[in-house]
Amino acid sequence: MNDKKPTTPRRDFLKTCATKIPQWLLVFSAFGPEQARAVDGESDYNPVEHNYAMGVDIHKCIGCGRCVDACKKENKVPEEPVYFRTWVERYVVPPEGEAHVDSPNGGRDGFPELPADREIFRTFFVPKLCNQCANPPCVQVCPVGATFVSRDGVVLVDDTYCVGCRYCIQACPYGARYLHPTKKVADKCTFCYHRIRRGLLPACVEACPTQARIFGEVGQQSSPLRRFLRFNDINVLKPALNTEPKVYYAGASREVR
Amino acid sequence: MKVKKIPQQLIPLAFLLALAVAALVIMRLVLLPETFGEYGHYRALAVDDVAALDIAYAGHQACAECHDDVYELKQQSNHRGVACEACHGPAAAHIEAPDEYAPEVPRNREHCTLCHGYNPTRPTGFPQIIPELHNPRQPCMTCHQPHHPELPHAPEECAACHRQIVNEKAVSHHASLSCTTCHDLPAEHLVDPVMVRALKPSTREKCGQCHASNADSAPEIPRIELATHGEGYLCWECHYPHQPEANR
Amino acid sequence: MELILGNIVNDLSKITGYIYPNEFELHWGILVVVYPYLTGLVAGAFILASLERVFDVSSLQPVYRLSLLTALAFLLVAPLPLLAHLGHPLRSYQMFLTPHTKSAMAMFGFVYAWYLMVVLLLEIWFDYRKSIVVWSNEKRGVTRYFYKFLTLGTTDISDRALRFDDKIGRIITIIGIPSAFLLHGYVGFIFGSVKANPWWSSVLMPIVFLFSAIVSGIALVIMIYMVTTMFRWKRLSMPCLNKLAELLFYAIIVDFSLELLDFVQRLYEAEESITILSQMISSRLFISLIISQIILGTLVPTISLAWARFGRVPDEMRRLMYFIAALLIQVGIFSTRWNVVIGGQLFSKSLRGLTVYKLELFGLEGALTAGLLLILPFLVLFVLTRVLPPWSAVESHVSESPV
C-alpha cells in the first residue's frame, strides 16, 4: 500500500493487467473511464507548489456570523442548526471559575444578550473550522481512503467513495465533521477548495468584514498570512494531540479548546 | 514409503482458497476506481470533483468590474474591508445572469446590527449601538450610507465604540468620572479613530491627582502615599481603572 | 424540516454545558453497541472451545461443539449491525477493495474473514467431517445432497484421514486462540486508538475488551447449554457446568480487576478530561455503569458464582444460581459495551458539556433492529444445531460417565 516502495515484479504485473484489460471489462465497472476535468482557467496549476493554511485573529472577530452564513450558502451545508463546516463560539470568562461558552446556531444569527448576572472578566469570539491538520486523525482512520490530504495540503472527502461509517467523525478532536443528512457521507470544511483553485478566497474569508480570518499558504512570503504569523503569538488547538493543525490562532487563550 | 500423499481433504480446500484469491484479484481489477492510488490512498479524480463544484460567492473583484463606482466609494470608507457579498449575499448567479437574478439588498436594521448592535464580547473600539435606543425603527440608511458609512456627526459619547468599558465604569467607583478625566482626546480621534488614538495616562501623578494622600479631592476617596505605595509599578499595572478593585 | 427543527430544539434543551454544534448528533448508536457485544461473544465462546481442544480440559467436552457452533452463529451475525449502520452499506466492499492500511477499521474485513474462513469454518469442518460423510450416506432426499455438498467431495474417513483431521484441527485451534484474541482485542483497539476521545483512548482498552469477551462468551455458553439440555430432556453434566462456572468466576475476577485498574489509572492521572468524565459517570451513566455494569453485572454474579461453586449448595439451587449469574453477566457486558460506545459520545470533545442519546424504537438504527440482531444469532444457532447436531458424540460421553 505504500507508494514509495520500489515496485515489485508482481506489482508490475498487476499494473499491466490493470491497464491492458480489455474494454469490455470496463463495461461492468461502476467507474467507467472518465476524463480528468480541469477547472476553468487553471490549466497550469501544480498542486505540490501549494500548501494552504488559515490564520484566525481572535482580537478582530466581532461575532457577526457572516462567515457561518457564507459557508452554509457557498457549500450548501444543511440548514439545520446541527451541521456546520464553520461556526463561531462565544467565550465569557468570569473572574474565577469555568468559562461559559455558547454558539447558538453556530453564531450564524449573532449572539443573544448575556444574562445580566453573568460576570465578565474577559470575553471573546472564536471562529472554528476544520483545522486541515498536516497529521490528520480523520484520514488515518478512514477505512477506504475516502478522506485524504490532497497534494496541496487540504483534507478532502470523496463523497462518491465514503461508506458513511463515521469513524472519521469520532476521530476528529475538533468536532469539525458531520454526517451529511441526505448524502449520508462525512462532510467538512474544504477551505472552499473549489474556490481557492479558481484563485478566490474561501467564502468565510471573503465574507468576514473585519479580516479576522486570513487565508494564505504556508511558506509563501510577502503575504497577509506571513505577516500574521510574524507579529502574533500563534497557537493551534489541542496541540498535545499532535495533529499539526494548519489553522493558526492569534489570541486563543487557555480556555479555548 | 517416504513420499507422503497429500490428504484428500486438502484438495477441495486448496481449490476454494484459490477461488477466493482469484475472486479478490478479479474484483480489484474490475472495481478499482480509476486513478485510485495515483497520488496516495485515494481516488485522484476526487480532487477534481471537489474543485469542479460551483461557486456561490463571486468574490468582490467580480462585483467591481461592473459596479466600479460603488466599489470605489466603498474603498474610500470604513467599510473598505467589508466585501460586497458580506451584505448582499452570494452573487455568482447574478454575474452569470445579471438580469435574471438580483442579489439581496438588506435594508432592515437587524442586518446592520449583526455587526453594529451592542455586544460586550465585541472588541473595544468597534462601533456599536443599542438598537432600542438609537433612533428606534428608523432604517439605518436614513442617516448612514452603507457604501460610505461615515458618521453624520461625531459620536457624542465614547460608548458609541467603547460601550463595554463605559458600562463597566458605570457600576464602579469611577462612575462619576468622565472618560476624558483620564484620557486626553484629540479631536481627530472622533473622525479617524484607528489612526489617531485617544491617549492613556502615562504617570502615577495622574491617578495621584485624586488618590495621593495630599490630593485636593473629596475626603471619601481612598488615599495612598504616592511615593511608597506599590513602588516601582505604575498604578494601572495592578488596578484596572475602569473597575477599580482597591477595596478587595 | 420544521418537525426536525422542533425535535432539535427540544433535544438541545437537554444538553448541559457547551457541546460543539456538530456533536449534537450521536454517530454511533445502539447498533455499534451490539457489534462489539456480538464479537465478544464469538471470541469468548471460541476461547472456551479451544480450552477443551488444546488444553484437554475434558470435563468441557459436552460443550465443545456447542461453543464452536455458538461462535459461528454469532460471528455470522456480527457484521450485520455494522453494515446496517453504514451510510452506504452497498459501498462496504470497498473495505476489501482499497483497505487503508493505517485504518483500524479497514482491517476489520480481513480479521473477520480470517477468523470466519480460516479458523471457525475450517475447525468446524474438520471436526464434523466424519459425521458429515456418514450423514451423506445415511440421509435420504435433499438432505443427502446437502451433506454431500458439505463433504466437498472428500469421502475418506479412514483412520489415517481422521487422525489427520484431528491433528489439523488442533493446529487450527492453536492458531485460533491468538486469532480470537486478535478479533476482539482488535475491536477494543478501534476504540482505544481514538486519541481525540479521552473516554476511549487507553492502552488497556483492547485487553479489557478481550477479557470481558471471554466472560460474556463463557456465560453465554452456560446459558445455551442449560437451556438446550432442558429442552432436549437430557441431564446436565454437572462436572462440566461446575468447570464452566469456575472458569467464568476466574475470568470475571480478571476482567473486573483490569477495569478497576483502568479506572484507578484515569482517576489518578486526572487529566484535563477528568471533570467532565466524572460528571458523566455520576449523571448520564449512573444507571448503566454503576448499577447495571458494576453492581448487577459484576458484583452480584461474582458473589453468586463463588457461593454456588464453592459453597455447600444443592445441585438444583446451584444450577439456578449459575443461570442467574450468567444472565446478569450478559446484562452487565451489554452495559459495558453501551458505556464504552455511547458513553464515549455523551460528553463533548470541548470537555465542556454533556449531550443525550435518543434511542429510537423504530428505524434502521432503532431498538427493534438491535433486538432483532440480538435474537438472530440464536435462530442461526438453532438452524446450525439442526444441520450439524453438536450432541450426538456428547451423549454417549455423558451417559458413560455417571453424573
Image: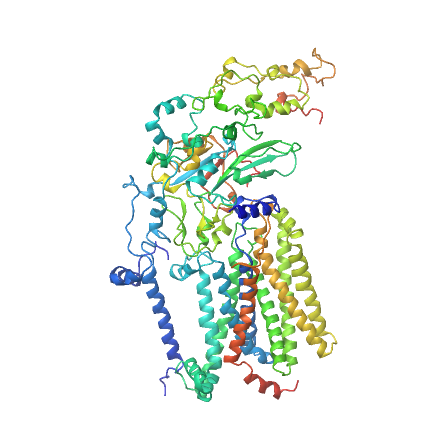
Is residue C168 among what the camera can see?
A: yes
Of residue C175 and residue C236, the one placed in the foreground of this image is: C236
Q: Quadrant of the C terminus of chain C?
A: bottom right
Name the spot of residue C290 as percent of width and height, x first: 67, 57
Question: Which residue appears farthest toward the front when viewing the image?
Answer: B100
Name the spot of residue A69 as percent of width and height, x first: 47, 37
Q: Quadrant of residue B17?
A: bottom left
Look at the picture and state if C192 lies above or below C146. Answer: above
Look at the picture and state if B99 lies above or below C318. Answer: above
Left or right side of A190 for B128: right
Look at the picture and state if C382 lies above or below A43. Answer: below
Q: Quadrant of residue B209?
A: top right
Of residue B243 and residue B211, the one placed in the foreground of this image is: B243
Q: How many marks?
A: 0
Q: Residue at x 40, y 44 (%)?
A: A154
Of residue C56 and residue B106, the one placed in the foreground of this image is: B106
Look at the picture and state if A175 lies above or below C295. Answer: above
Is residue C68 among what the camera can see?
A: no
Q: How is the image coloured?
A: rainbow
Q: Residue at x 44, y 39 (%)?
A: A71
Name the spot of residue C153 as percent of width and height, x first: 39, 82
Name the spot of residue B116 as percent of width and height, x first: 52, 27
